[in-house]
Image (spheres, rainbow, N blue to C red):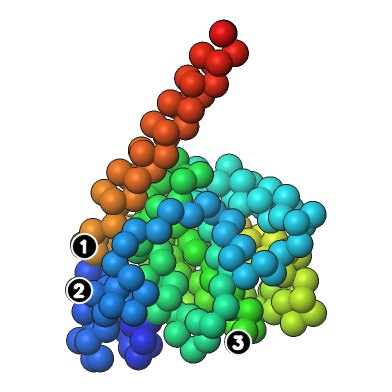
Amino acid sequence: MKCPRCVQVIHRGANVCPHCGFGLAEADTKYGAEDVSLRRLADVAGLIRSRERAKVSAALDRFCRKFPQLFFAVYTSSGQGGNLRQFGFWLLNRAAFEDVPVDRPNEAGILLVIDADSKSASVTWGYLLDPFLTEEDTFQCLSRAHAYWLEGRYAEGTVRMIEQFEKVLKKKVAQARRDPERFERKVAPPPRTGEIARRIREGHKHHAAAKQSSENTEVNR
């Protein structure tokens, strides 16, 4: 992987970048150390029109069906600017996606962050995808959406980008079947993230179950 700040290649299991010292602790200082509860489509900046959100949600669902071990999430923001890579790194580490099954940890996630003010975007992925994705792959996928985003067609661009990710991963999966040793994960998992996401998602599930039980009780009355 590359350091989100200095963009030098570093070992995925490193706590901090050996070149510039950046790590999750520094990102926590900037963005907060609390865990963030989100849904896979979090249009905080309001870039996607309400009638088009269903198209993006459908693309996210389709991605999950095609790749049952993975998930894809989209977050739009404003004011992150040149720190988009750092913000994406922090958010994938700190987010608990309430509409993602517990058995799909953040380490198996792909996160797209779009910043409205700087008109830029960044992709961050979990370490389980390291054998299957490269910086060149993600650049290709972002390029697929670039023209649409320049015209303010954020939903269409995002759908096109997700489709391109599906093509890239489908090709990599086929290669992995032919040469599995080449795609074996050869790094130790980085510290943290999985258990916190699991705990928060379990909390969402229990809350939903309790709410459903309460609703059923009201109906029975």
Q: Residue furthest front?
A: 221
Instruction: Return the residue at label 2.
Output: 15
Callouts 3 and 1 close, C-beta under 8 Å? no
- In the rendered image, residue 25, in percent from the top left (x then y), is placed at 23, 74
Q: Position of residue 186 (x, y in %)?
A: 25, 63
Q: Rounded to the nearest whole Å, what is the CA distance between mark 1 and mark 2? A: 7 Å
Residue in front for this viewpoint, 88 or 180: 88
Q: Which residue lies at the image location 27% right of the left edge and 83% below the top edge?
A: 22
Which three-letter amino acid code belongs to the residue tagged 2? Asn
Direction from residue 104 to residue 62 in the image, left or right: right
Q: Amino acid at mark 3?
A: Ser
Q: Percent from the top left, x then y, of residue 144?
A: 69, 74
Q: Nearer the viewer, mark 2 or mark 3?
A: 3
The quadrant of the picture occupied by the N terminus is bottom left
Q: Earlier in the sequence, mark 2 or mark 3?
A: 2
Q: Are marks 1 and 2 in contact (CB under 8 Å)?
A: yes
Which mark is on residue 118? 3
42 relative position to 151: left or right: left
Q: Residue at x 40, y 79 (%)?
A: 86
Which one is in front in this view, the residue at disc 3 or the one at disc 1? 3
User: What's the amino acid at mark 1?
Assistant: Pro
Element type where label 1 sits in the image: loop
The CA span between labels 3 and 1 is: 31 Å
Badge 2 element: loop
Q: Nearer the viewer, residue 204 or 3?
A: 204
Asked whether residue 157 is in view, the answer is: no
The residue to which callout 1 is attached is 191
> Where's residue 67, x and y in %?
52, 47
Instruction: For the C terminus, give its image quadrant.
Output: top right
Q: Tell me which corner region of the image, top left, top right, bottom left or bottom right, holds residue 102.
A: top left
Label whose residue precedes the other's in the sequence (1 or 2)? 2
- Disc 3 residue crowd, few under 14, some 14–19, many 20+, Cα 10 Å: some
